[in-house]
Amino acid sequence: MDFIDWFVPAGIEGEPRRVMRHRGVAKSLLTISLVVTVMLLMLAVFRGHLSATEYALFAAGILMPLVGALLIRTTGSITLGLLATNIGGIVIIAVWAFVSGGIVSIALPGFLANIALLSTYGNMGILLAMGASLAATLLFLYLATAMAWLPPSIVAAADVPVLMLTAMLGSVAIVVISGLFVARDRALVKARLLEARRAAEQSSRAKAVFLRSMSHEFRAPLDSIIGFVDHMAGDATQVLSDDQRKCLDRIRTASLHLEDLLSQVLEMSRVEADDLSLAIESVRLDQIVAPCLAIIELEARKQGVELIDRSESHAGHAVWADRVLIRQVLLNLLSNGIKFNRRDGKLTISAEPVGGAFLRVVVTDTGKGVPGAMQHELFEPFSRLGLEEGSIHGAGLGLVMSKRLVERMRGHIGFESTEGIGSSFWFELPLAETAGDGAAPSP
């Protein structure tokens, strides 16, 4: 722990970004006090004498940043400390200017330190408020000078050049040294962020490798279970009771469901690890919709859901997409539309150009809709919207994967839902006809 850490409020040790910010503010405030102290010593050496008023103003200039730093340490509020320091600084420099020449005073360069500190650490509200205060102060000094309200200057004419040089050098020193602190701290933060990013990427890759390995380890016994169940169910020499056949059916259903979950987790890990290569090409809408409807038709029939295709009028439109992955996205949306629909409900797929550059594909169901309080969870991994204990199976990864795949293809995805009426999920992909020179956009 160094001296600067003493000015960091207690209780934020576990928050590196806040600690770095508080350290930066403390360094800048202490720099102002140090530079003003050096200015005082330089003037004492070169001039040999200072008036009581000058000593008092210099003392105030040294103490005010220290008070601000202590206030931040005590309250934990950078905003409060900056406000106190800058208001005090403006008052001190304004008094200096008033008693040493008004609007042409040698003290005016000191305002640079206030502006530098605010522009580096202050928020927009503080910057605007202090900027307005500083402008009002300068206007007052101008009027005081123009209206001859000023008292006799406390600085003799012969001392003006030395004091002006000291003020200019001091202001430059404060701005430069504070800037160096800021640049160094930002470089440290950037290095830490890069390190954290590399660690996260390595972790993601390691997770993907682990999941692939475990997926293969799980698939072998699962395939064996499914194989033995099929063998027992199809063995004509075995006489099974109805209960036994029901048990076999349940074992097979559960095994297939577990296999599907493993596949989803593996695909999700590949997407997150950026281990999924895309083959972007021009794909006609009917080449996406027709195969998906053919695959999902049996499931819809089992659930008593009517499939309605209203995309025929745009069947000839082509989009830039990965042919296999975009079908996976549409299948996810269609499967959800059936899974969360009501008995004898409808599932409609439609399409329309959007903005002249994209084609939007919409899947609309007549289910219960998504409650407003849960809509923000739709694209969160493993979110099942409170259906964890229900009869609807799934890992809660379909929409998350769909979103990431569509975005990888430079598209957009979204939804609209009304509770009790139904939901519409859509995705948009770039139209191939508007891709300029005909080259596919890079994924």
Image (spheres, helix red, strand yellow):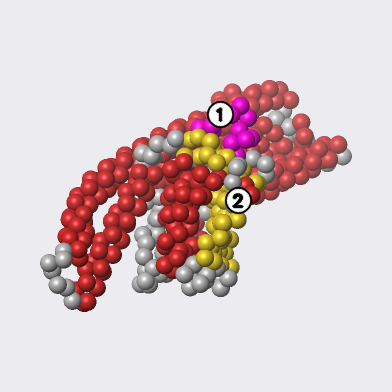
Q: Quadrant of residue 102?
A: top right
**Which comes sooner in the sequence, label 2 or label 1?**
2
Q: Does residue 44 appear in this view?
A: no
**Please, which residue is most extreme toward the left here?**
237
Q: Position of residue 270 (x, y in %)?
A: 35, 43
Q: Position of residue 284 (x, y in %)?
A: 55, 41
* Above-or-below relation of 80 to 423: above
Badge 1 density bin: few <14, some 14–19, many ≥20, Cα 10 Å: few
Inter-mark Cα distance, 2 to 1 = 26 Å
Which quarter of the rendering shows the N terminus?
top left
The region drawn magenta spans 430-443
Between marks 2 and 1 in the image, the one whose residue lies nearer the viewer: 2
Q: Does residue 388 appear in this view?
A: yes
* Above-or-below relation of 196 to 388: above
**In terms of depth relative to the viewer, which is nearer, 299 or 45?**
299
Q: Position of residue 172 (x, y in %)?
A: 59, 28
Residue pictured at 25% horizontal, 61% vertical: 255
Q: Dot 1 lies on which element? A: loop
Which residue has dot 1 on it? 439
Q: Quadrant of residue 208?
A: top left
* Left or right side of 194 for 127: right
Residue pictured at 73% horizontal, 32% vertical: 105
Q: Position of residue 283 (x, y in %)?
A: 52, 39
Q: Looking at the magenta stretch, what is its main secondary structure?
A: loop
Which residue has dot 2 on it? 312
